[in-house]
């Protein structure tokens, strides 16, 4: 019989959630402002910066399953996951600072290589820490409902991190002005602050959170190819990642199209984009406990499906919002945030449940590979959503210096109805999701974890 915990203390859940504050703060800073740093602070041509990041992103996409598999095979007196947090916290802080502290005056091939190498090193350290951190959630407890509670705390930490990296960071790197020299100094400061935040957050998790029974879990003996193929034969997992991928695609489309919608459709300035983002994230954080309760009273699949359906309604309605209707846009943003709140917590609570199904079939626990493939799907659909918005804008003739009615129509479609369709396509998959509270308990009984 495996030693597992049914309940976690509030302190353990809070401690685990702290890790996401630092990790997601760095992710938000990089996602929103890294290209601005290269072009406006370092004065690197956008083409060179974007091309370097494109090649770096290839490694970013494929490294999730790799590091998941490596952590599954790790032998350490600190456990399979915690060892990466212990020894990765300080290096992650350092490389985050270095990412935003490149020398000024870079040109041509030197700029390309500096961006490529620094981002690859940063992303390697980030994945080496973030992947084991995420996989640890499946080891802390095997209980169906307790996992939802744990991931609710983690999701609140992620929202706080995103608010810091998305909304607070500009006050740091823009404090001294917007000329290149001032921005360079500001971004160095932001890199230092968010690097230290990530390092301290992860170090705190390594100190406070220690999975029970970790010593009993033997490293996987599967080679990487067999590990991936076996993972993709897990039918509940495949259904989950398809639904998650459709949702991620839709969310990426509307987040990419939002700045264009606010400026070109609503005729507002870019500051209003930040206001919308702030309202969205606050609503997401407020309603995470609500969706946790819905999942406990029904099932995770049902709760996720309802959340996506509500979000799709709000997204579709964005199409009708026009000039002078910023208040209506904010109201729809609140509705969308209410639905998206389910997406922030429920799928991450569903993912650990597939591990026991795999264990029953293979005799091994491979949390790392499951979270790695999940991360791979996440990054693929993020990239696809971004690219599709670009294609749509091009197809409708978008030109920044001459925005036609046709271009505005393309923006309206990309910011509302089209992503809503993808969210609705995920709903039937989730309503028929095969893992619920009873079926998961039966698997655990067969594994000898429940009597």
Image (cartoon, rainbow, N blue to C red):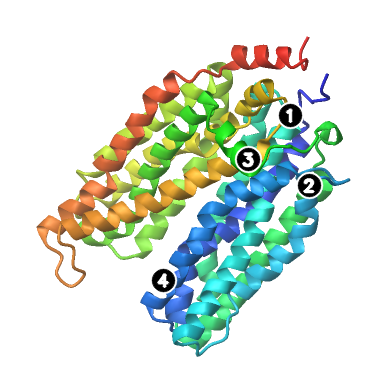
The mark lying in front, picked from 2 and 1, is 2
Residue 409 in the image: state x and y as whole percent: 16, 52
Residue 361 in the image: state x and y as whole percent: 65, 21
437 vs 170, left or right, is: right
The residue at the point 66 percent across, 61 percent down is: 125
- Residue toward you, 30 or 178: 30
Q: Farthest residue in the bottom direction?
A: 105
Distance between mark 2 and mark 4 Cα atoms: 35 Å
Q: What residue does disc 3 label?
A: 369
The mark lying in front, picked from 2 and 4, is 4
The mark lying in front, picked from 4 and 1, is 4
325 vs 237, left or right, is: left
In the picture, the quarter occupied by the C terminus is top right
Q: Residue 141 — which label? A: 1
Distance between mark 2 and mark 1 Cα atoms: 15 Å
Using a 10 Å C-alpha cutoff, classify the residue at mark 4 as few (fewer than 14 neighbours), some (14 to 19) or many (20 or more): some
Asked if residue 77 is positioned above or below residue 242 in the image, the reply reads below
The mark lying in front, picked from 3 and 1, is 3
Q: What residue does disc 4 label?
A: 51
- Residue toward you, 84 or 415: 84
Q: Which sits earlier in the primary sequence, circle 3 or circle 1?
A: 1
Q: SS at mark 4?
A: helix
Asked if residue 112 is positioned above or below residue 419 in the image, the reply reads below
Q: What residue does disc 2 label?
A: 82
The residue at the point 63 percent across, 43 percent down is: 224
């Amino acid at each position: 019989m495996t030693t597992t915990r049914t309940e976690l203390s509030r302190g353990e859940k809070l401690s685990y959630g702290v890790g996401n504050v630092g990790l997601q703060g760095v992710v938000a800073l990089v996602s929103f402002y890294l290209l601005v740093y290269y072009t406006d602070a370092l004065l690197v041509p956008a083409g060179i910066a974007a091309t370097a990041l494109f090649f770096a992103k290839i490694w970013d996409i494929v490294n999730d399953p790799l590091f998941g598999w490596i952590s599954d095979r790790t032998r350490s007196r600190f456990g399979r996951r915690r060892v990466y947090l212990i020894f990765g916290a300080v290096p992650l802080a350092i490389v985050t600072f270095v990412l935003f502290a490149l020398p000024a005056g870079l040109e041509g091939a030197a700029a390309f290589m500096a961006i490529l190498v620094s981002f690859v090193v940063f992303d390697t350290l980030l994945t080496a820490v973030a992947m084991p951190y995420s996989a640890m959630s499946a080891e802390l407890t095997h209980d169906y409902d307790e996992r939802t509670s744990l991931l609710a705390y983690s999701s609140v930490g992620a929202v706080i991190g995103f608010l810091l990296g998305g909304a607070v960071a500009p006050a740091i790197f823009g404090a001294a002005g917007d000329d290149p020299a001032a921005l360079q100094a500001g971004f160095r400061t932001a890199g230092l602050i968010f690097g230290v935040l990530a390092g301290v957050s992860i170090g705190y998790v390594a100190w406070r959170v220690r999975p029970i029974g970790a010593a009993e879990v033997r490293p996987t003996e599967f080679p990487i190819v067999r590990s991936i193929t076996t993972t993709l034969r897990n039918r509940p997992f495949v259904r989950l990642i398809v639904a998650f991928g459709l949702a991620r695609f839709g969310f990426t489309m509307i987040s990419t199209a939002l700045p264009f919608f606010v400026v070109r459709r609503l005729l507002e300035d870019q500051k209003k984009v930040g206001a919308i983002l702030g309202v969205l994230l606050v609503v997401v954080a407020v309603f995470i406990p609500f969706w946790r309760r819905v999942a406990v009273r029904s099932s995770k699949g049902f709760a996720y499906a309802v959340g996506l359906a509500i979000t799709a309604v709000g997204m579709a309605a964005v199409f009708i919002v026009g000039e002078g209707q910023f208040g209506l846009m904010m109201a729809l943003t609140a509705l969308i945030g209410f639905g998206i709140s389910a997406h922030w917590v429920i799928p991450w609570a569903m993912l650990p449940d597939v591990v026991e199904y795999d264990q029953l079939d293979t005799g091994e626990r491979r949390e790392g590979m499951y979270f790695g493939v999940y991360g791979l799907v996440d990054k693929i659909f993020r990239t696809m959503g971004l690219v599709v918005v670009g294609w749509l804008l091009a197809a409708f003739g978008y030109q920044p210096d001459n925005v036609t009615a046709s271009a505005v129509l393309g923006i309206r479609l990309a910011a509302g109805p089209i992503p809503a369709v993808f969210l609705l396509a995920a709903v039937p998959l989730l309503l028929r999701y095969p893992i619920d509270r009873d079926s998961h308990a039966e698997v655990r009984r067969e594994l000898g974890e429940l009597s």
